[in-house]
Amino acid sequence: MGFLVNSPTNDYIIHNSLFSTTKILNVSRIAINMRITKL
């Protein structure tokens, strides 16, 4: 499954991982901003 680069499921998995990574980054950025404003 790893070498099927053009398969739609592979694209879906890559898109999902990128989306969840950006979501995690956004959440951590918001938490950092809230921590800075609390100080």
Image: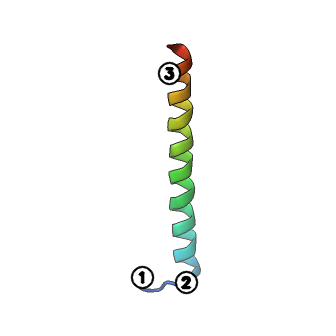
**Direction from residue 3 to residue 23 in the image, left or right:** right
Q: Secondary structure at mark 3?
A: helix
Dot 2 alpha-carbon crowd within 10 angstroms: few under 14, some 14 to 19, many 20 or more: few
Of the residues shown, which amino acid type is indicated by label 2? Ser
Residue in the picture at 49% in, 84% down: 5
Q: Secondary structure at mark 1?
A: loop
- Please report whichever mark, 2 or 3, sits nearer to the chain's N-terminal start: 2
- Please report whichever mark, 2 or 1, sits nearer to the chain's N-terminal start: 1
2 or 3: mark nearer the eye: 3
Whether pointer 2 and pointer 1 mark residues with C-beta atoms closer than 8 Å, the reply is yes
Numbered label attached to residue 7? 2
**Foreground: 25 or 7?**
25
Of the residues shown, which amino acid type is indicated by label 3? Arg
Residue in the picture at 53% in, 60% down: 18
**Foreground: 12 or 27?**
27
**Position in image of residue 31 (x %, y %):** 52, 29
Q: Which residue is mark 3?
A: 35
Q: CA distance from mark 2 to mark 3?
A: 42 Å
Q: Is residue 13 above or below residue 21?
A: below
Numbered label attached to residue 1? 1
Whether pointer 2 and pointer 3 mark residues with C-beta atoms closer than 8 Å, the reply is no
**Direction from residue 16 to residue 4 in the image, left or right:** left
- Please report whichever mark, 3 or 1, sits nearer to the chain's N-terminal start: 1
Numbered label attached to residue 32? none
